[in-house]
Image: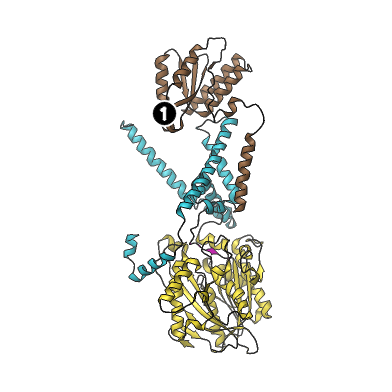
Amino acid sequence: MLKGHQSWVFENRPMITATGVTGGPFEANGRLANDFDLLYEDLWMGKESYEKAHRLLLEDAIKVTLQKGNIQKEQVQFLFAGDLINQITPTSFAARTMQIPYFGLFGACSTSMEGLALSSFVVNYQGAKYVLTGASSHNAAVEKQFRYPTEYGGQKPPTAQWTITGAGIALVEPNDPEKENPVTTSATIGKVIDMGLTDPFNMGGAMAPAAADTIIAHFRDMQLEPSYYDLIVTGDLGRVGHDTAFELLNKSGLNLERKQFQDCGLLMYKEDQPVQAGGSGAGCSATVLYGHLLNEMKKGTYKRMLVVATGALLSPLSFQQNESIPCIAHAVAIEMNGEKG
Amino acid sequence: MINIYRWLIGTCLLLLAACNHNQPVKDSSLALMKTTNPSPIMTNQKKDSDGVEEIRKEVSSLPEIYDVAVVKGKQDTLVVYKVKHLHRFKMKKIEKQVNKMLEAKHPKENFTVSSDYKIFLESVRLNEHIKSSKFSQQKAENRFKEIVKMTEDLK
Amino acid sequence: MASKQKNMTPQQQNYQTLQQKHELKRPVLKNCIKAFFVGGLICMIGQAVSYFYIYFFNFTEQSVGNPTVATMVFFSMILTGFGVYDRLGQFAGAGSAVPVTGFGNAVISAAIEHRTEGFVLGVGGNMFKLAGSVILFGVFSAFVVALIKTLLVMWGVL
């Protein structure tokens, strides 16, 4: 049901029953290694190209999800997913392997929440019984497309971010009151914000206003106070964007506490890993949310959280032509089943 | 990161170790790194070597120049010198100057002037060979011609 | 920068000043020092290589450049292949990019990257993706300088 200007409320509280999270070698050394279902020892993952490895990440995440959800792939109605590679081929090719009816999404790094919002909407209105949604990215494949070759010895500035290697997939199905699972309660779809930043090595700074805009819109539409959520987590703003977004929000009159406001890109890696300002990529919010954060939620650390995935909608061509970087953010609210308003 | 340091340190050690063999060090093996100042020599040792000593002194007197090697063959005289580091920008000018000076003072001689390290090194080597009488006069003359030819390739 | 700012709305300008406050600054001085030493070290190795060629082969000071450059590029290609050079690059910045080893790295990294697209369109077509502009502008500026010198000599200035 539409509420306010740009938000949906899911009265039937669609449920995330199972998740599958895969990652690469760099993530295996990270802070959240234990929250991954499957970790690869090397970036090639036994494939001949990084793009094929990228596809494998996603296929494996889907397989793990199906296994944990204890269903067959034939039972799944739809797959909502996307990635960052040209024409989202890794996701489309994985959908070919899986033979699940498929919506290919592109929202850059906001794809994960775009997918979760859409699949919750579809499930909420009995459009499907089982929906898979998620996003993935592969460091080498993405760097190859957007930046320099992997082995090129260019110096990255401290505002640059590290594209994570990983895929996160969630199985969304109608609410079952018997089960203790996270449910989605509302979503806010963001609009494209462009603050005129042009530096592709400072995505966090470009994306922060989009995140702030969507969060402000969410609280306005839902008529809630920030204290309603235990945790407001952004997708991949990194150190720069996260601080900036925090200041923007506080200036706008929303009183957030520092502890309550986290960032997936900062949660992912240890301090000593050379990731500059933090992790990024479509897989970043997907793996951290579907792995670490939902696990914490099941443990009871968080009861309600708002996940805001941000995406920079640039292409290598657009920034070479000196276009600024337009950005978008989508928010989905997740609660534990049974925790009524 | 640590790996890179290991690499670098390893490489440095290797380089150092390579330089450190326990033989009596010949002048020619360090000719490029320190001042050798070899005594001037002629391929024909029987002749009087006063002339070449004089040439050496004249060239050495230029303030930009240190370390001069002079080798005199049958027809040509090879003069090789090192230029002080800060004056290396003016190499061409110095070469002209040396040429002019020598031609003026010894109009009969035919000079080949060079500041190339390789020529210097080969001159020192030739010098050593002649002194240790490893080379016969004919052989020395041939080697000398080869070196002179090498300088011509430079131009 | 100034002309860019004119085209922006006041809102964008406000945000950019706010954002700049949080932007992590490049440690310029530290980077310069690191670049100086690593670059110097690379050049020292290059000097050692050229002495090696002078001592043991028939190269003069002027002709030794070619084999030395080839050897240094070869070294950097091996280091690139082993995945060391990009980490060195992150540490040293310009120190490892400006010497000829950086050129070798740019060529070979692109070649490795596009190996999966085949030899002709992948390796062949993309090898000089980064280094191509170096070659183009290097040759062009050499041409311009040579032209100027020729003209000066013709007019008798030099």
Query: Relative to B55, does residue A244 appear above or below in the rendering?
Result: below
Specify start and end residues of the magenta stretch as a single range.
A153-164
Query: Relative to C35, does residue B144 appear above or below in the rendering?
Result: above
Which chain letter goes with mark 1? B
Q: Magenta region, mostly helix, strand or loop?
A: loop
Residue A158 shown in magenta: yes
Within 10 Å of disc 1 (Cα), the crowding (few <14, some 14-19, many 20+) is few
Query: Which residue corresponds to the image point at 39% horizontal and 66% vertical from the top-left?
Result: C16
Q: In this orientation, which residue lies closer to the viewer: A135 or B92?
A: B92
Q: Is residue C25 left or right of residue A287?
A: left
Q: In this orientation, which residue lies closer to the viewer: A242 or C68?
A: A242
**Chain A painted colour:** yellow
Query: Relative to A235, does residue A47 appear above or below in the rendering?
Result: above
Q: Quadrant of residue A42?
A: bottom right
Query: Which residue corresponds to the image point at 61% horizontal and 77% vertical from the top-left?
Result: A296
**Chain B painted colour:** brown
Residue A313 shown in magenta: no
Helix, strand or loop at disc 1?
helix
**Chain C painted colour:** cyan
Residue A122 in the image: x percent, y percent? Answer: 55, 84
Residue that numbered label 1 is attached to? B92
